[in-house]
Image (tube, grey):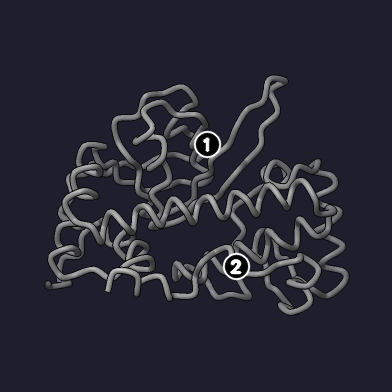
Amino acid sequence: MSNSNPSPLTPMLRKMELWAAFSDSDREALLAMPHTLKTIKEGHYIVRDGDKPTHSCVMLTGFTYRHKIVGAGARQIVSIHRAGDMVDLQNSLLGTADHNVQALTRAEVAFIPREAVKEIAFARPAIGFAMWYDTLVDGSIFREWVANVGRRDARTRMAHLLCEFALRLEAAGLSEQTHYELPMTQEQLADCTGLTPVHVNRMLKELDKGGFIQRDKRAVTIADWRRLAEIGDFQRGYLHLGGDQSAALQ
């Protein structure tokens, strides 16, 4: 099909084609899904815990994050999302949201009715498989984050997060592997890693002083990828970016 007037849903198509092989008609059907475009301001909620979402949100630009608020009021960030991600596919299909989805930066998003998501997933097996696979990869990343917060020391947690962010942005075509903009404050990094903002600042300075990274405000340059990955106990397999999964439906 012609690329002279690309669909706003093209980032979602690129992401889903990491997980399954689509026919031309699959691509056309995915890009033709009904949607409403919205701009979400930094800090605004897309979904709140307890909501009953009627739409699934697709990231087009910017960043969002999922988080839980515990009884004492503290926040735990459980994932960061970028262009192409269907950040609340789980919320929209489970019926009642069990966590919050909030804009980390100003973001352009597309809201797709949940019935349209269910219809295309059942009508087109390759697309249904890709959506299923996408939620499984989310689960894989969640497990790694649990291990990161629960069993790694502070410096390892921070190095691991920096490595993950680098690869995920590179896979989305948003940066180079060794240089990117980190769209999080030290408070938000603390809520990702279970540390205090003061401890986050200390760990970033330690990684910078050791020559593993270089920082300029929020810009991060990974000066020694191999050593940073070693320090961060980072193995990329849990991100499932290898490309073999698309053979499953061929």
Mark 2 and mark 1 lie on one chain; the one further toward the N terminus is: 1
- Depth check: 99 or 144 in front? 144
100, above or below 64, in the image: above
Percent position (x, y) of residue 159? 75, 63
Q: Is residue 50 left or right of residue 95?
A: right
Relative to 159, does residue 188 appear above or below in the rendering? above
Please tell me how crowded label 1 is: few (under 14), some (14-19), or many (20+) other residues with Cα within 10 Å. some
Nearer to me, 153 or 224: 153
- Residue bearing mark 1: 43
Residue in the foreground of this view, choosing between 174 and 128 = 128
* Vertical side of 8 occupied by 122: above or below: above
Mark carried by residue 166:
2
- Residue 165 is left or right of residue 95, and the answer is right
Which residue is at the front of the view, 78 or 21? 21
- Which quadrant of the figure contains the N terminus? bottom left
Secondary structure under badge 2?
A: helix
Position of residue 180 measured from the top left corner of the image (x, y, whole percent): 59, 67
Give percent across and percent down for residue 105. Answer: 51, 47
Q: What's the mark number on residue 240? A: none
Tell me if label 2 and label 1 are in contact, CB under 8 Å.
no
Which residue is pictured at 70% across the width and 65% down the height? 216
* Residue at screen point 44% across, 39% down: 41
Identity of the residue drawn at 18% across and 44% down: 119
Q: Quadrant of residue 26?
A: bottom left
Q: Quadrant of residue 233?
A: bottom right
Label count reads 2
In the figure, is residue 136 to the left or right of 247? right
